[in-house]
Image (cartoon, grey):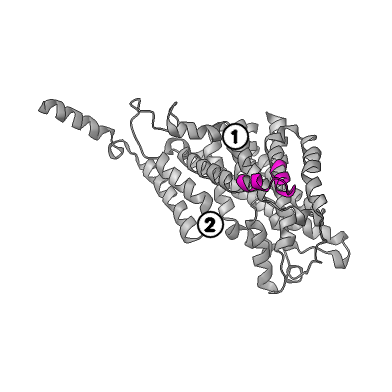
């Protein structure tokens, strides 16, 4: 009996995480703890970074596979079931449904030319795509990496799950990391590319948008985008559907569900499983370092493109219609954080210049723009 107990105890010890762990596992656990610290201490996207950070810790607890089906990559495990929403790409559309149900497109409808600013910020995606190709990534992999420039985590997951599933964990974590670091990265480029005179430009109040316009917009928006980029349907379709639920005034309950409880559930599962997928053996590679560098480059290009495009537009606009270039950063898809950065930076130079509502125009345009860019890349490379 004692021999049996001793043998089983010895086997049990060899199956513990302490016995199976490698230094790389502990490094990733520290990364997960760092994400949680950023979320709680610095208030950087806590709804995203806490699930992702905890998932990184969870996914890097080492174990020997003995048929217990507990790992995220083991068939029939609970985590693997949750991960199917990431792997098969059905979490991102559900997130877009919630975004559509929560987003007010009034600022964009009141000043439609701001759509161009959101489009200009997508240069970050295509600029990073070219650089990724130059660094030796395959075209499909380069597309998955480049979408990070849109600062849209769900879109990055959706596209990488289709084109570069082997890099999806690194791409997803990189995308959400830079989304969380918007307040750190963007202000530098905004100040670098603008003058003090430009930063205090006061924009005229937006016109009033009727409820009829708000109802028509998601229908027309779907037709104008999906008819050109049908491959973007999974994202664009549910985005505009969610917005129609919000604006129709007849489906308020559905809009509240899509934008609150359903969205929260998907965000929890998405963040946790994305974190779990970043196992050290797959994540700590030279390609991951390149992805994080390219992500930073893409994000910088997107921010600069938006700001510079507004400056170019001002050359052709009359004095009373000029735009404040500080809203150009909001062309990325980090809603509403990027718009808040426009507001915060603007208030530092004029305490009475409120740019938030103006910045929401390019910000929501960036959501549409990133989905269109993803659909274009998927249609071109898929």
Give the mark count: 2
Residue extending furthest toward the bottom: 351
Q: Which residues are magenta?
A: 241-257
Say which residue appears at 72% left-offset and 31% top-offset: 379
Tell me the SS state at disc 2.
loop
Q: Would you place residue 55 above or below residue 5 in this image?
A: below
Dominant secondary-structure state across the stretch colored magenta: helix
Task: Say if the magenta span includes residue 89.
Answer: no
Task: Say if the magenta span includes residue 250.
Answer: yes
* Left or right side of 179 for 352: right
Would residue 290 be visible to someone looking at this image?
no
Q: Nearer the viewer, mark 1 or mark 2?
A: 1
* Left or right side of 92 for 320: right
Tell me the SS state at disc 1.
loop
Q: Quadrant of the N terminus?
A: top left
Q: Which residue is mark 2?
A: 44
| Mark 1 or 2, nearer chain start | 2
Say which residue appears at 81% left-offset and 57% top-offset: 209
Q: Residues within 10 Å of mark 1 (few under 14, many from 20)?
A: some
Q: Which residue is mark 1?
A: 90
Residue 230 coordinates in the image, percent (x, y)? 75, 32
């Amino acid at each position: 009996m004692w021999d049996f107990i001793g043998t089983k105890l010895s086997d049990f010890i060899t199956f513990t995480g302490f016995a199976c762990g490698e230094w790389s596992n502990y490094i990733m656990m520290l990364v997960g703890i760092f994400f949680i610290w950023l979320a709680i201490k610095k208030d950087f996207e806590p709804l995203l970074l806490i699930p992702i950070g905890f998932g990184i810790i969870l996914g890097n607890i080492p174990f020997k596979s003995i048929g217990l089906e507990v790992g995220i990559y083991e068939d029939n495990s609970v985590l693997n079931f949750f991960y199917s929403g990431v792997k098969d790409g059905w979490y991102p559309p559900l997130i877009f449904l919630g975004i559509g149900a929560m987003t007010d497109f009034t600022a964009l409808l009141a000043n439609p030319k701001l759509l161009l600013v959101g489009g200009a910020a997508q240069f970050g995606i295509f600029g990073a795509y070219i650089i990724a190709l130059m660094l030796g990534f395959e075209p499909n992999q380069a597309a998955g990496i480049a979408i990070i420039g849109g600062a849209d985590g769900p879109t990055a997951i959706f596209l990488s799950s289709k084109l570069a599933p082997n890099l999806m964990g690194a791409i997803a974590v990189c995308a959400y990391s830079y989304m969380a670091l918007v307040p750190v990265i963007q202000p530098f480029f905004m100040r670098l590319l603008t003058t003090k005179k430009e930063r205090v430009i006061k924009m005229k109040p937006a016109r009033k948008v009727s409820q009829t316009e708000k109802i028509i917009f998601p229908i027309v928006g779907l037709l104008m985008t999906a008819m050109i980029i049908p491959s973007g349907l999974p994202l664009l379709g549910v985005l505009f559907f969610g917005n129609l639920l919000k604006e129709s005034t007849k489906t308020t309950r559905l809009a509240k569900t899509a934008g609150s409880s359903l969205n929260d559930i998907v965000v929890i599962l998405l963040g946790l499983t994305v974190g779990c997928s970043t196992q050290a053996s797959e994540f700590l590679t030279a390609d991951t370092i390149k992805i994080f560098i390219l992500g930073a480059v893409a994000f910088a290009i997107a921010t600069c493109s938006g700001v510079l495009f507004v400056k170019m537009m001002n050359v052709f606009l009359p004095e009373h219609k000029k735009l404040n270039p500080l809203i150009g950063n909001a062309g990325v898809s980090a809603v509403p954080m990027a718009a808040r950065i426009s507001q915060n930076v603007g208030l530092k130079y004029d305490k009475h210049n409120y740019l938030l509502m103006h910045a929401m125009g390019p910000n929501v345009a960036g959501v549409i723009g990133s989905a269109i860019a993803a659909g274009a890349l998927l249609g071109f490379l898929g």
